[in-house]
Amino acid sequence: MIWIRADANETMGSGHVMRCLSIAAALRKMGEKVCFLAADEKTVPLLEAGGQAYHVLHTDYTRMEEELEILEGMLASCAPDFFLADSYFVTAEYFRRVRRRVPVGYVDDRCVKGLPLDLLINYNIFAEESLYGQQDGTRLLLGTAYAPLREEFRGTQYQVRQDALRVLVTTGGSDRYQLAGRFLEKALGDDRTAGLEYGIVSGAFNPYLKELREWEKKNGNVRIYSNVTNMRELMEKSDIAVSAGGSTMYELSAVGVPTLCFSFVDNQEEIVRGFVDQGLVCFGGNYLAQGEGMLEMLVEKMALLVSDRRLRQAYSEKQRQMVDGKGAERIAQALLQGK
């Protein structure tokens, strides 16, 4: 039995849980049982949609050490074979105490050093051993080969079409600054991009879904998708993606959708910069640094991509070379080896 500790809500979005669900699916396919642990009920809809067993701790997701007394009792009575955590609020003390009873692993985005771990996973484009210093006794799984994508993202057959007509817009699990709607307003108001078809993916914790539905009602070329279960299909039908930095970037790369990327929280910036520096995507800006100027920049760069098929083709080919869609399986194998 593998235990996975992760949360999702309107503040942190759904990315931590979604990538762990991919790992869990790979583990179950290999015959392993998996149980998720979540702080509160907000995570439950995602887990149930993924057909995943779970236990709610009824704790504060930002104060993980306070749940240790509950967790240690559960570990003593249930004795799982491995404990994997995916949270920005986990601490070294948390891992030390859990590790007394079970091997532990961590899915890391921020290159946190010195954690007492058996396994550390950082699948980001910027991840390398030098970022972690000396990690005695810790096995490192680093780089895009370990991007934990759902199985549907393997072996895609994407084609870059002559004319770019369809744009897919995704801001992740939440959109705290209402960027999807504000981008739509800019794009629909520009003669170069007003006639394109826009598919907006609204995450599970997007507080502005009602406002997005209003755009859909007023514009025949706008479609809003929520509770999406066919992300690969939406991507394959799109000629350009406008995406925030995050796990979706790796999904878009596996499919090969020419991507215009941006960031609106600090932990996205390094991902976006890694993709841009390697010439894999078109850079659309940083909202925290540019504000409204980023939205204008997105429209300018999208107009460029629409007009240049060769540029779209180059981005698509480079992206597909970087991500093969087998990362979740590789992580699952490592977890089973670490039991």
Image (tube, rainbow, N blue to C red):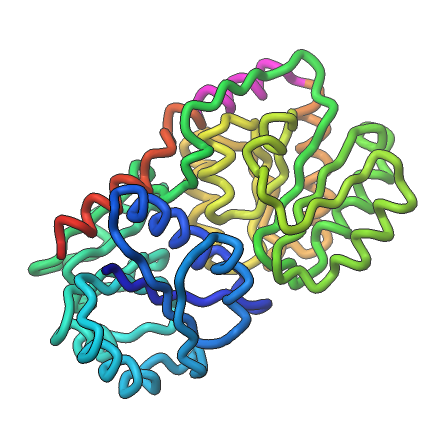
**Image coordinates for residue 11, horizontal then vertical, percent:** 56, 69
- Magenta region, residue range: 308-318
Q: Quadrant of residue 118?
A: bottom left
Question: Residue drawn at (39%, 72%), measured in percent from left and top?
Answer: 55
**Image coordinates for residue 279, horizontal then vertical, percent:** 45, 29
Question: Residue drawn at (37%, 44%), measured in percent from left and top?
Answer: 148
Q: Is residue 141 left or right of residue 41?
A: left
**Image coordinates for residue 152, horizontal then vertical, percent:** 46, 33
Magenta segment: does it hold 293? no
Q: Is residue 157 above or below residue 53?
A: above
Q: Is residue 44 above or below residue 139?
A: below
Question: Residue drawn at (30%, 85%), measured in percent from left and top?
Answer: 70
Q: Nearer the viewer, residue 293 or 82?
A: 82
Q: Nearer the viewer, residue 212 or 124?
A: 212
Q: Residue furthest right?
A: 218
Q: Split into 4 quadrants, where in the image is the N terminus? A: bottom left
Q: Split into 4 quadrants, where in the image is the C terminus? A: bottom left
Q: Is residue 55 left or right of residue 297?
A: left
Q: Say if residue 87 shows up in the picture.
A: yes
Q: Quadrant of residue 190?
A: top right
Secondary structure character of the magenta stretch overall: helix
